[in-house]
Amino acid sequence: MKIAVASQNRRDITEHAGRCRKFWIYHIENDSIADKQLLELTKEQSFHDSFPHDPSPLDDVQVLIAGGMGSGLVRRLEDKNIEAVVTTETVPDRAVESYLNGSLVTRAIEPHEHGHRHAHERGD
């Protein structure tokens, strides 16, 4: 199992997962952390700047933990069979350990509006 945690500053869980470009990837074996690696995306690979059906380096994770994400990102993750988890926890290692033992404090995912429309047109 792989769990991704949004962490733009590499220390804390990021509040806005859509714009985040740095994720800790936790490799889980026997319900514990076996390995942890940093994945850095390009700006174009971030959820906010990529298209929902484009391949992503995060496609092979089963869970994505963040401090916040909009309902559009949640649907996008669900389409890729990735569980979206929004938490109040700020420490990545603690969040993963708590997720694994069932004690992670989560919060509801709120509808997310930017206040502007996205064209998201390809410049091919």
Image (cartoon, rainbow, N blue to C red):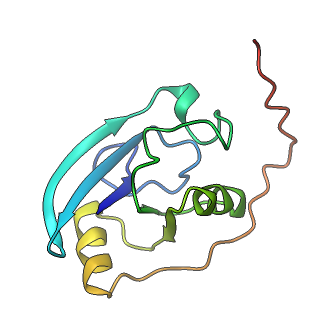
Going 21% across and 44% down the picture, which residue do you hit? 37
| Residue 22 in the image, given as x and y percentages of width and height | 39, 40
Q: Is residue 25 above or below residue 86?
A: above
Question: In the image, 109: left or right of 66?
Answer: right
Figure label count: 0
x 32%, y 87%: residue: 102
- From the viewer's side, name the closer residue of 55 and 115: 55
Q: Is residue 32 left or right of residue 20?
A: left
Above or below, comparing residue 82 to residue 51 in the picture? below
Q: Position of residue 76 (x, y in %)?
A: 65, 55
Q: Quadrant of residue 113?
A: bottom right
Q: Residue at x 37, y 56 (%)?
A: 5
* Residue 53 at x, y percent in the picture: 66, 42
The image quadrant where one finds the N terminus is bottom left
Would you say 71 lies left or right of 60 here? Answer: right
Q: Report which quarter residue 33 is drawn in.
A: bottom left
Q: Position of residue 4 (x, y in %)?
A: 37, 55
Is residue 81 shown left or right of residue 49? left
Image quadrant containing the C terminus: top right
Residue appearing at x 68%, y 62% in the figure: 75
Residue in front for this viewpoint, 117 or 101: 101
